[in-house]
Image: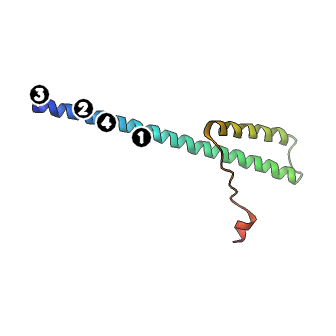
Amino acid sequence: MGFLDKVKEQAAAAAASASAAAKDASTKGQAKLDEVQTKRLADSLLHDLGAISYGSVTNRAPATAEADATAIVEKLQAIEAEHGPISLDVKNTPDAEAS
């Protein structure tokens, strides 16, 4: 095997390795994007559920509040079934604001 053959072989191996690395990075990037989009959807649904709850407590809930809440809970449960538990950390508590 000549010198040029060895160089061509190494170049082909390097190209294959780079292609595999790029594909892996693309897959990881897509997974992270999906994770962020799912978190945003869950946060939005939790916000809406909180708004319905607040409306119920203050006697301002729309007539469809119970059905809306049930639909939101079903969507949240579907997200949890596919992606695992949703964080239920409370971000704005009265104690946190007093500090």
Marks 1 and 2, the one that precedes in the sequence: 2
Judge from the rendering whether residue 26 lies leftward or rightward of residue 63; answer left or right.
left
Marks 2 and 4, the one that precedes in the sequence: 2
Crowdedness near tag 3: few (<14), some (14–19) or many (≥20) residues, C-alpha within 10 Å: few
Furthest toward the right, the residue is 59
Marks 1 and 4, the one that precedes in the sequence: 4
Q: Amino acid at mark 1?
A: Ala
**Residue tagged 3:** 1
Q: Which mark is residue 12?
A: 2
* Disc 1 to disc 4, C-alpha distance: 12 Å
User: How does the figure colour the protein chain or chains?
Assistant: rainbow
Marks 3 and 1, the one that precedes in the sequence: 3
Residue found 69% across the figure and 51% down from its top: 88
* Disc 1 to disc 2, C-alpha distance: 20 Å
Crowdedness near tag 4: few (<14), some (14–19) or many (≥20) residues, C-alpha within 10 Å: few
**Residue tagged 1:** 25
Crowdedness near tag 1: few (<14), some (14–19) or many (≥20) residues, C-alpha within 10 Å: few
**Residue tagged 4:** 17
Q: Nearer the viewer, residue 55 or 10?
A: 10
Residue found 79% across the figure and 38% down from its top: 70
Q: Position of residue 87 (x, y in %)?
A: 66, 49
Q: Amino acid at mark 2?
A: Ala
Q: Amino acid at mark 3?
A: Met
Judge from the rendering whether residue 40 lies leftward or rightward of residue 72; answer left or right.
left
